Structures are given as C-alpha cells and as structure tokens.
C-alpha cells in the first residue's frame, strides 16, 4: 500500500510538471487583444504577437508558398482557445512549410496551459469542378499529425486534433503541405486549446492528503 501511495503521489505531481517558458520575444511585441491580423515581420526576427493569452513568434515560411504575408488571430475569451490562420497560396503539385512557436503569456494565462492542437487547411480546385487533393503533415512537441482533404468528391480526415501527453507552456509547430493535380491551398488554420492546471498550493494539499491517507492505512493495519 505504501508503494502504491508513493506512486500515486509521483503521478499526481508529474502530471503537472511543465517545461520552462521558452519563446523569447527580444524585439517588438504587438498586442491584438482577442482578434486581429499581423504581418510575418511582426512574427519573426525576435518580434512577437500577443493574441488572447498566448504569444506567437519565430515564424518561418519555406517552399513554394506565396503571399503568406499575413496571419489572423481570434479568441472568444482571454483565457480560451486561440485560432491562428496563415493566409497564402500553394498551387498544384507543390510543397510548402510553415513553422512557428506559441507560448502561454504568463501575465495573462493564470493557471491555464496548452493541452491540444487542432489542424486544418482550405482547399480549392483549379479549374473549378476538377478533382484535387492535398495533405498536411507535421509535428508539435514530439506529437505528429497528418490529414488529407479532397474536393470533387469532397472527403476529408481534417480537421485533426492532437492531444499532448502533458500540458505545456511552449510549443513549436512544424507543418508541411503537399498538393496534387488541380489543387490550390489558400490557408492553414490552427486552434490551440488549453486547460486549467492546479496551482502549486493545490498540489501541496494533494500530496499532504496522500501522505495522511497512508498514515491512516498503516495505523489500521497495526490494529488488525
């Protein structure tokens, strides 16, 4: 029983063991409140954008993506999910990459931490009415994701949601989009969600409670 209680205490504490805040905003931080748009210049070169209770930065774009000079942000509440949309264009039989970093803004987030990431993108066919498909793959904090959209006929495994093994303060998202014949991708959309985690004082009470339970059980065993 003592071993079980010790293991439970370790699990309870490790479930809320969080990596350090890693995103460094050494340049200008642009505050958008709950919604707004920002240029990629405002998201790179040490510059950051604050949207909702999150900070975004370290954006880089590669491959055949064009027109990716703008990102839009929206949140329903200060301590809630934030959706970011990268607006651009990727034509048929092409590949493109977007990488960025997102972190909890410690001044606004309170005890909320990143829990999962939803991925999606917008696909059209050129010429209209023809069959087209594209696939989005990538990773975030060691978790991989993949989804495919087709039009004419319309089928999809997107959006796809990846839940992390533990909550985190900081996340780097690497994503790769590949198009087939007649396919044009015009935007990639991510929704970063979070949950509240116990404050350190709550964890201390949990640990004390487990120790107290262990003492009671040991006393009962001596009386039997």
Image (cartoon, grey):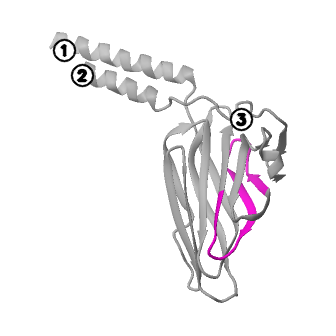
Provide the residue designation for mark 1: 221
Q: Secondary structure at mark 3?
A: loop
At 83% from the left and 48% from the top, the residue drawn is 41
Q: Quadrant of the C terminus?
A: top left
Q: Secondary structure at mark 1?
A: helix
Image-quadrant location for residue 171? top right
Q: Are marks 3 and 2 in contact (CB under 8 Å)?
A: no
The disc, 1 or 2, on the residue closer to the chain's N-terminal end is 2
Eye-nearest disc, 1 or 2: 2
Residue at the outermost left position: 224
Provide the residue designation for mark 2: 1
Q: Position of residue 155 (x, y in %)?
A: 53, 78
CA–CA distance in space, label 3 to label 1: 49 Å
Eye-nearest disc, 3 or 1: 3
Q: In the rendered image, is residue 76 in sight?
A: yes
Q: Secondary structure at mark 2?
A: loop
Provide the residue designation for mark 3: 105
Please report the bounds of the magenta region as a residue range: 71-97
Are there few (<14), some (14-19), or many (20+) residues within 10 Å of tag 3?
many
Q: Position of residue 200 (x, y in %)?
A: 56, 22
In magenta segment, residue 73? yes
At 49% from the left and 53% from the top, the residue drawn is 144
> What secondary structure predominates along the stretch shown in magenta?
strand
CA–CA distance in space, label 1 to label 2: 11 Å
The disc, 3 or 1, on the residue closer to the chain's N-terminal end is 3
């Amino acid at each position: 029983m003592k071993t079980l209680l010790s293991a439970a205490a370790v699990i309870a504490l490790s479930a809320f063991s969080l990596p350090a805040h890693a995103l460094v905003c050494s340049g200008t931080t642009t505050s958008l409140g709950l919604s707004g748009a920002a240029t990629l210049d405002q998201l790179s070169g040490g510059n950051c954008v604050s949207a909702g209770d999150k900070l975004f930065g370290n954006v880089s774009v590669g491959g055949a993506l064009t027109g990716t000079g703008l990102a839009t942000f929206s949140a329903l509440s200060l301590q809630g999910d934030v959706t970011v949309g990268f607006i651009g264009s990727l034509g048929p039989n092409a590949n493109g990459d977007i990488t960025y970093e997102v972190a909890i803004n410690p001044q606004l987030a309170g005890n909320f931490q990143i829990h999962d990431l939803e991925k999606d993108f917008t696909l059209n066919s050129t010429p209209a009415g023809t069959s087209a498909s594209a696939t989005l793959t990538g990773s975030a904090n060691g978790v991989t994701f993949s989804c495919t959209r087709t039009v004419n006929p319309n089928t999809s495994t997107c959006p796809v949601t990846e839940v992390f093994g533990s909550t985190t303060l900081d996340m780097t998202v690497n994503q790769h989009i590949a198009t087939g014949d007649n396919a044009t991708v015009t935007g990639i959309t991510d929704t970063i969600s979070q949950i509240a985690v116990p404050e350190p004082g709550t964890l201390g009470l949990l640990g004390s409670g487990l120790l107290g339970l262990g003492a009671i059980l040991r006393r009962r065993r001596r009386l039997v």
